Image: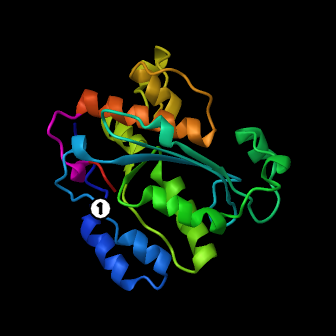
Amino acid sequence: MNRSTKQPRIDWAQYMGSLAETSRQPLLAAFYQANWPTPDTPLDDVEFVALDIETTGLDARRHAIVSIGLIPFTLARIRSDQAWHQLVRPYGDLIPESVTFHHITHSDIRRAPRFGEILESLLQRLAGKVAVVHYRNIERTFIDEAVRHALGEGLLFPMVDTMQIEADLYPQRQPGWLRRLRGQPPISIRLADSRARYGLPLYQAHHALTDALGTAELLQAQVATHFPAPQRLAELWY
């Protein structure tokens, strides 16, 4: 498949080592010192963790995380027994639009912990693993902003973006005029529509743990379909 040349590539193993040396926060320094895979690691050998968050909106500077779901997996196995789902109590009120979207209400989060209270547990589950998300701009920016609010220092870690894979597979998602006349719709790279292209089942959307599971299954299907073995991790992470 043709890979996008516009996205920067980072040697995350090396970069995490440099962050460990410069971080002022012991909790983050310990996270960065984990045993991270190198760019040459075959995908079959990578320990992934599918990650999804639900938020009160789309602007990380004004909105907040209200739930986090993650599940460890490899290309051969999804470790459902290690799945983790956590509600988070944001600062400020929920807005009606977000409640309608993810169905998390004020009563659900009234006794939930703040993000800072679950941060150590989250980092333990992410350390040394490659996070797999569907649209990294959400998870990366919201988690970074939440950690800045909690500790005064941001957080970075490697991600594989299943939406980016679909975007690279279908760079011309809008049909031409002739196909539009024939009623052909644009190609959607949203999670549910991407899964449907691989024959994966339809799950309830906008629940962090369910979406994390859906993302894990999607990456397994994408790699099996489009990436002949052996394939290096460097081809996929951002």
Q: Quadrant of the N terminus?
A: top left
The image shows residue 108 at horizontal and vertical percentages of 80, 47
User: Can residue 173 be seen by looking at this rendering?
Assistant: no
Height in image: 133 above or below 197? Answer: below
Height in image: 162 above or below 27? Answer: above
The magenta segment: 227-235
Q: Nearer the viewer, residue 111 or 136?
A: 111
Magenta-highlighted stretch: main secondary structure?
loop
- Residue 123 is left or right of residue 105, and the answer is left
Residue reaching furthest right?
Answer: 107
Instruction: Give the amino acid type for the residue marked by disc 1 in the picture.
Output: Trp
| Quarter of the image where one finds residue 228 | top left
Residue under label 1, please give it.
Answer: 36
| Quarter of the image where one finds residue 211 | top right
The image shows residue 141 at horizontal and vertical percentages of 53, 62
Residue reaching furthest front?
Answer: 81
Q: Does 121 appear in magenta?
A: no
| Quarter of the image where one finds residue 23 | bottom left
Q: Residue at x 15, y 35 (%)?
A: 229
Count of numbered circles on the image: 1
- Residue 4 is left or right of residue 175, and the answer is left
Q: Residue at x 49, y 63 (%)?
A: 123
Height in image: 232 above or below 93? Answer: above
User: Can residue 98 be seen by looking at this rendering?
Assistant: yes
Q: Nearer the viewer, residue 5 or 163?
A: 163
Height in image: 151 above or below 61? Answer: below
| Label 1: which secondary element | loop
The image shows residue 60 at horizontal and vertical percentages of 62, 62
Q: Does 228 appear in magenta?
A: yes
Q: Residues within 10 Å of mark 1 (few under 14, many from 20)?
A: many
The chosen color scheme is: rainbow
Q: Residue at x 69, y 56 (%)?
A: 88
